[in-house]
Amino acid sequence: MPDQTPFPTYMKDVLLRLKKQLPCRDNEVSMLLSLFGEPQHYSYPSILIYGHRATGKTFVTQTVLQELKLPHAFVSMVECFTPRLLFQQILSQLSSLYPSLDEEFHCETLNDFIRIFRQLSTSNVLDQQTVYIVIDQAEVLRDMDANLLPGFLRLQELVGGNITVIFLTEIVWEKFRPNTGCLEPILFYFPDYTKAELQQILCKDRHPEFSDDLYATYINILLGVFYAVCRDLCELRHLAALNFSKFCEPLLKGEVRESDTHKLWRSIEPHLRKAMQTVYLREVSSLQWEMMQDTKEETGYLKGLSAYTHVDLPYYSKFLLIAAYLASFNPARTDKRFFLKHHGKMKKVTFLKKHEKTSNHLLGPKPFPLDRLLAIFYSIVDSRVASTANIFSQISSLVTLQLLTLVGHSDQLDSPKYKCTVSMDFICAIARTVNFDIVRYLYDFL
Amino acid sequence: MTTSSVSKGCFVFKPASKKQRILSAGDYFHDEDEESASSKLRFETLQSLWQQIKLETDSIQEELNKNILDSLAEFARTSTTFFRSKTDEWTFRMRSSEIPTAALVLGVNVTDHNMTFQNLSELLHQSVTPYVVGLDAKDCPSLKHTVQKVLLQLMGYHLSVEEDEEEPQPKANISGIPKKRIQCSIATLCEWYQTVTKDSNGLSPSKKRKSTLGKFGQNPPIVVIFKDLESFTSKVLQEFIIICSQYIHQLPFIFIFGIATSPATVHRMLPHSVSSHLCIELFQSLSCTKHLATVMDKLILTTSFPFKLNGKTLQVLLSIFLFHDFSVRNFIKGLQLSLMEHFYNQPLSVLCCDKHKASKRAQVLSSEECENVRQLPSFMRYVENQEPDEQVKLLTDDHHLKEVVQQLLKQLHLYHKNYYPVLRCLHILTSSLPKYPLGKQIRELHSMCLERNVWETEEYKSAFQLLRLMAKDELLTGFNKCLEILTYGKGKVINEVQEKLETFVKLFQELDNISLDYKEDDGEDTSPQKGFQQKTDLFHLQKTLLEMKELKKNKKLTKFEMLRLEAIDFIDHIVKKHLLPPEYLALHEVVYYSCSGTLRKHLNAAPRTAIQTALNNPYKYLPNESLQSDGGAISSTAPDICIAYKLHLECGRLINLYDWLEAFGTVVSATEGNDTESPVIDDVKHARFIRAVSELEFVGFVKPTKKKTDHVARLTWGGC
Amino acid sequence: MSKRKSKDDSLSIGECISLVQKILRERICCQKSNGKPFGVEMQQKHLLELLKRTVVHGESNSVLIIGPRGFGKTMLLNSVLTELLGMKHIKGNVLIVQLNGLLQTDDRIALKEITRQLNLENVIGERVFGSFAENLAFLLEALKKGDRNSSRSVLFILDEFDLFAHHKNQTLLYNLFDISQSAQTPIAVVGLTCRLDVLELLEKRVKSRFSHRQIHLLTSCDFKQYVIMFQQQLLLPEDFPDKSFAEEWNQNIRFLSRDASVEEILKKHFFLSKDFRSLHLLLMRVLCRVTVSNKTIKPADLIEASHLCTMDSKANILHGLSVLELCLIIAMKHLNDVYDGEPFNFQMVYNEFQKFVQRKAHSVYNYEKPVVIKAFEHLHQLELVKPMDGPSVRIQKEYQLVKLLLDNSQIMEALQRYPQCPTDVKQWAASAFA
């Protein structure tokens, strides 16, 4: 859209400032402005802005509203977990606009909200300027009272004032539409940044001490590694910040010249790959990561969170867990074959049958009754165990540890069903500690 | 310890506060015995002893948790300062603002955690921040509740602060908070926080000196502790974290995740979009087995407490710990229980106290106590070994008896004094051996010694064979360690041992000076050493052993080897001298608690078996002579449920109710003696039968089934 | 300000545009201005008759206006009301109570609202009603007082009528209809709803009291009318200050509606749906493009706008995904092909993906499993995959059964539009079976 006075009412410098503040979002900004129209004019009752994380939905909307000094309220739905909170927030933000609005309003329902709002809009302080209500993370609205979403969508009509509600979300409109339909908002897509745009934006905040193009090359390398996995601008910026010092290391040491990008690439690339598993997954706290770089430690020494998978359990708990694993990953009909001394000839049959069906480790654990668990337990534990209270209570403590889960409701007392929710290698580690060869007992690995 | 921990599993539930319990036990003691003097005495000894033990354990707890807690506090302190300080720096501006988070891995013994968290929050309160919130999963089912909990704890705390420093103005707005329910959102918390921090480090500094906020810098962090991360619902957690991360700039949050299993659960619960708001650091508390080791060291393997456990009881406690729950707390409680049992059941436990007190009390033994002493099997054994006249004197003359008892008690104490150092020495020497023939942990060795004569066991023999092959340097290091230990031990025996060892060490050291000019045997005696250097697999060792054997055959031993043999034999000798099991000692019953059965019954109950025994022979529980049944026969006098049970044992998977009733009728009517083949089932019998069956169903032995009409399914296996 | 303008009838171009914007926006955004409903004259007459009878002769009535969303139920009603209130002898002796199912979510609130709108608060004064029943009783009293020819008549307008039917045993509806049956204060109950089966929602006792008058708004306007409607929405009124500009504008509009490409687009929309709202959506977007720089609507604008309107949002979202996530989606597509539409879990998807990776010699794509899981979670967040069972059940993420909410055509299209999509991925997607 050409720039010469598309929006007569707004000062040029404001527009320019916007353009500067919001890089690579010119189309969106101008589109938004044209949707808003002039302050006094009506705008469409509801606008739904959707797009991926960190595509500037919130930022753009907020800056535009603030820069143009339009009357608006901005709420994020995650905080407002009750409708009451939502209303309170909106009203309290608007109360700054309307001197007439007293603090002592309390509104529980949409009805009260609308009533109060009507009173406001009748008291004509902002000579019919459009009031904007921005609702961030709007997808939460769906899980709240059924009347909220449609209500907000047609707020303008209900209040009968000049109001526009803007929804911001990552989720497409199709997922919002209630089954009896509602007033359709104007859909407005914020496209994700292209690689070039990311490059441009990331380059904007370069390190003060280093030259522009050096930083550009750095960003280039960074994107080369991470772009395939993550396009989240914030995340990328974060990563850039964390790894830059490492990148500069050879320069500071004087081993490499700035121009020699290939060397730089070779020095940093493996490091970044490591970062993908550690920092990107928050295996290692970013602080530790930085320290590790400062101390020039060999990156191997710092183990991520999930490196510590080892859990030491009481002896019988281990066996209980193993039994549970077997019970939930072996079909019940094969128990005979595994746990009986003389299990006849049915082996052949199972062998034939197992090849056509998909493995249980794809389908996941199946629930099993308590007595099956105990039966397996007693057959795999070598010594003679008395069925004491402790054994039973160990099961429940395994449940509290989320190693087993109780299927169905916990209140049904007779014949509860459980599932084992530990991973293959976890259970293997456990089995190794009690030197029990679990693979021999697993149906999938016959 | 709350009732919730019962549901949490492996933990025998005991009344919360031990004070009441002991008191009640106290008068129980009195009512029990006639001669309340000794009983009172016993009770007092018990109490004092328990107090000592308790103090000891607490101190252990503290110094064990100390470093982990300190590191956590440090983390909290630094992270806040860090996140404040570097705001201007480039990297900091760039990086997305994260919530500093400590993942604290505590191990699976869940009930021990409460204590830890208590200490932690106290520590934080004192040193880092007044704002500490502890969240339990069970009272945070939804985001709303969670936020409410946080607000309540924080602002509630604030309220108390304001009260002890009279300030009207803030009180006004604070007093409002609990009453009219302010909208509970983090926003309100934010405002509150601003007001608090402002007026705390604001205007009147003189006042603020004593204000609690004074000592925690400008704006102290808000620490939120998730006590059991696993049980939180991930949705609540995610939303809470997101909200907090939006406020991180106003509110310096710090999270602490209490993790029982493994840190990977964090990733299991949080998607990337959430976990990217956290800056997680890992803290691992020391494993509970180590914890146990220290506890054993301080409580069991020491002479400071007169009370001892014999092999079996110790086994029970240890097995409960190792097999069922890793809870040290329960181990100690078990110890406490055995202590009580001992003092309660063993009248002679008056003598179970330190040496001087014991001898004093021995002098004032009452006559029937003397009788008790004479009844003691160990004492009897002792008597039998005396000359006849001595025997007579012991059995008749109380005064003489008391003398002897004092002697014996002294011996007992002496025995203990020597036992432990020697035990440790032996452990040190053997724990480095391959395959650990005498166990890796000292507790194993200890229980072994308690059971039987160690030196007769196979393991011992193999161990000493290996010792006899040990390379010099290892031997020396071993001996030196032993010496260190022995220096702590007092008493002349120990000192002798010590001197002897020292001489050995000297000799060894001289030996290598000598061996310089003995080139040739040097060559020989190094060869076995080399063979021994990599002490990896037993097989290899056996081989070298054989070689040694034939070496011995054909050539005489080198100096070193002779010396080594001598030294090892000495060790062997002192072991034989001091490590004999306590059963051989007279009066060991006084200090050793031996009835493991009761202990097991209390700590590791088997409800199912109990019920079955009750049903099989009710006589065990109802001492009614007529119930003494002989084997399979069903006595008609038994309670109905027993009869029904015994009858149902004879049936298959499905039980026909009518047949059952018939059988029941015959058995019951056997009492009336009318041996008609078709017994009359009157309403009373019918009712009794129904009751018995429903009781059985309640116990869970039968259950109604739809497979067949008027049948019940049997839930028990086997039969008679 | 417009008054001053109206004296000299030539304004600067900017002012004209802004004025146009003002007028049209009011028309499009809030349907208050030129409330001429279209092609529903007879329904309008019918309704007007009913209401007049209530107001003038004091007959109580109840009627339902049923029609799909955006077909102008409200507009119809409003126009009727304005007309009604226009009549001088009626004006003043009718009270109007407007309720909305979205706002009055239960009868208690509804009652409060009614009392408020009838300005009975002052009558109530401070006395608080202990129970719902008391409140209702009082209100009924207030209504019953009058008889049919003395007292003022009341119009009850229930928007989103179907929602009222969900209230607890439909007390409000029952009472309203009951009054409308009996000869008390004359009231008319007008319900607006988009549910054709609304009568099924009513309980028997309620239904029996309802006079089964229904006004259906299923406009069967053909394309010609649609075009005229389109024109009407855009034409400027005669009283536009700057005559010449208005002339020019309207000229352009008429010309526009005759343009072939425009007709094309209008047809498309017409066949999609013929209601006002969707048209308004379109027009709004068109209007946004009217600025000083281009002061008339060109066909191009219309085309552009309609393109924006009919954009497939899911495709957009797909466009923003990372390559890894795209790969996962393709894997799911294959799974869907293999087990036709059966739900699957992450483990299977990962398996599928691994197969693909292994076939590729150069391992650009082999990421750690956790990374892949995170990607999967992201798809989950975007609700491109949907879990079969609720979040309440605790189960490992790997094994939770999910469904893919995209169809192959969407995926393939997204792949085409995807920026520098690696070719082997494309091939993989195209390949019939993995």
Image (spheres, coloured by chain):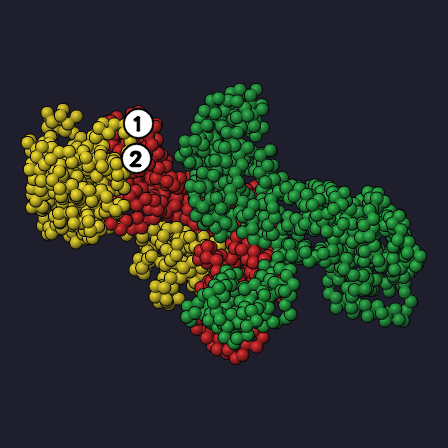
Q: Can residue A90 be seen in this view?
A: no
Q: Which of A67 and B177 is in front in this view?
A: B177
Residue identifier under label 1 = A101
User: Is B61 situated left or right of C263 in this image?
Assistant: right
Residue A160 in which image quadrant: top left
| Residue C141: quadrant of the picture | top left
Residue at (53% x, 72% y) in the render: B666
Q: Chain A is drawn in which colour?
A: red
**Residue at (70, 51) in percent of width and height:** B341
Residue ranking furthest to the bottom: A345
Chain C shade in the render: yellow
Res. C139 visible in picture? yes
Q: Where is residue A13 in the image (x, y as percent from the top left)?
A: 31, 30
Badge 1: chain ID: A
At label 2, counting other C-alpha atoms closer than 10 Å, the crowd grade (few under 14, some 14-19, many 20 or more) is few
Residue beneath label 2, please? Answer: C130
* Amino acid at the residue labelled 2: Gly
In the image, is residue B588 above or below residue C131? below
